[in-house]
């Protein structure tokens, strides 16, 4: 049976047994049942650090980030010598936008287990968010050193180098990420972003189309293609890609704006006005997710 939890029989109804069962249930995606076991475990033993940790993971999976952070904070206070809860706490704080507090937590995790690649990877993300790019690259490099198959490490190095204007370096790490995990669409998208900055438009088209083939429901590769075609006045191809993007994400205000501008140039004024109306109604505060940026666009 799919998603079957192997440990469904409770030998002893003790807090530790409930915790073990909850961990199995969480692994197999049974969040409600896992939460029920954890609540019982904590009722019987409120000082069980592992139960607070698993409760935090359940809450994190449910996007209840404030509550997750509170539970994980309790877990680390009850047992300060386990790296994994500190990493989870740092992840929750990162999602809450508390980068400095998250950095404290992940540094604590690394002090407990300096070989934990995921901790160094998370540290790199936090340092990049704080604008400390050189330190971020060093953290990603350590993560890659401890886990040479971790494709997200070279991916993130490439992203930081691209934002810094080091296009050759970004290309080197982006190709490494694709080589390590060619099935990850985000790696192909990044390679396309780098190719755009190199002026290698056909290489960018190839990379974005590979990403679209890997993630057919994702609007981002089509939005990238549409934007690139639009910038290079390949309007027929731009329209096709932008329509594909809005079909997958109807709230892409940027895509509607470009479609409106193209239709306006083609004297298709009624269609242009409709696209501008759609853009206004779906206006977002941000640009394309993960859009390739020039150094001048950086804060």
Image (spheres, grey):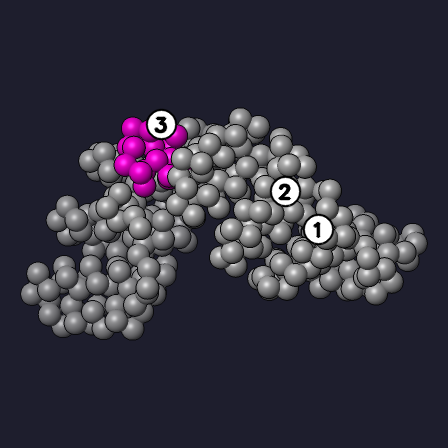
Which residue is labeled 3 in the image?
172
Label 1's element?
helix
Q: CA distance from mark 1 to mark 3?
A: 39 Å
- On whether residue 163 falls in the magenta region, the answer is yes
Image quadrant of residue 190?
Answer: top left
Callout 1 touching callout 2 (CB < 8 Å): yes
Q: CA distance from mark 2 to mark 3?
A: 32 Å
Which residue is labeled 1 in the image?
76
Crowding around mark 1 (Cα neighbors within 10 Å: few <14, some 14 to 19, many 20+) is: many
Would residue 207 be seen by someone viewing this image from the given angle? no
Image quadrant of residue 39?
Answer: bottom right
Q: CA distance from mark 1 to mark 2?
A: 10 Å
Residue lying at the far right of the rendered structure? 12
Q: Nearer the viewer, mark 2 or mark 3?
A: 2
Crowding around mark 3 (Cα neighbors within 10 Å: few <14, some 14 to 19, many 20+) is: some
> Percent from the top left, x then y, of residue 238?
20, 52
Which residue is labeled 2 in the image?
108
Query: Which residue is painted at 72% across and 53% down in the image?
Result: 77
Query: Which residue is painted at 55% across and 37% down in the image?
Result: 120
Give the vertical position of 253 relative to 4 (above or below): below
Label 2's element?
helix
> Percent from the top left, x then y, of residue 296?
23, 46
Question: Which of the two discs, 1 and 3, labels the residue nearer the N terminus?
Answer: 1
Point out the stretch of residues depicted in magenta: 157-175
Question: Which of the two discs, 1 and 2, labels the residue nearer the N terminus?
Answer: 1
Question: Which of the two discs, 2 and 3, labels the residue nearer the N terminus?
Answer: 2
- On whether residue 280 falls in the magenta region, the answer is no
Crowding around mark 2 (Cα neighbors within 10 Å: few <14, some 14 to 19, many 20+) is: many
């Amino acid at each position: 049976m799919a998603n079957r939890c192997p440990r469904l029989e409770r030998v002893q109804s003790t807090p530790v047994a409930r915790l073990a069962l909850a961990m199995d249930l969480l692994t197999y995606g049974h969040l409600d049942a896992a939460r029920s076991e954890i609540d019982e475990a904590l009722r019987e033993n409120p000082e069980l650090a592992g139960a607070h940790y698993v409760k935090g993971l359940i809450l994190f999976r449910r996007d209840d980030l404030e509550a997750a952070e509170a539970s994980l904070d309790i877990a680390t206070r009850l047992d300060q010598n386990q790296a994994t809860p500190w990493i989870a706490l740092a992840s929750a704080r990162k999602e809450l936008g508390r980068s400095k507090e998250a950095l404290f937590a992940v540094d604590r995790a690394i002090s407990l287990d300096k070989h934990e690649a995921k901790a160094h990877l998370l540290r790199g993300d936090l340092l990049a968010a704080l604008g400390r790019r050189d330190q971020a690259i060093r953290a990603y490099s350590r993560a890659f050193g401890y886990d040479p198959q971790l494709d997200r490490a070279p991916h993130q190095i490439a992203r930081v180098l691209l934002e810094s204007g080091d296009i050759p370096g970004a290309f080197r790490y982006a190709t490494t990420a694709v080589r390590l995990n060619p099935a990850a669409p985000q790696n192909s998208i990044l390679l396309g972003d780098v190719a755009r900055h190199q002026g290698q438009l056909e290489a960018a088209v190839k990379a974005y189309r590979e990403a679209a083939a890997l993630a057919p429901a994702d609007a981002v590769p089509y939005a990238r293609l549409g934007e690139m075609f639009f910038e290079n006045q390949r309007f027929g191809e731009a329209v096709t890609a932008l329509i594909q993007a809005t079909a997958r994400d109807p709230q892409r205000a940027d895509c509607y704006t470009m479609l409106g501008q193209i239709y306006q140039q083609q004297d298709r004024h009624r269609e242009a006005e409709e696209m501008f109306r759609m853009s206004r109604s779906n206006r977002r505060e941000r640009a394309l997710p993960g859009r390739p940026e020039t150094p001048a666009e950086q804060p």
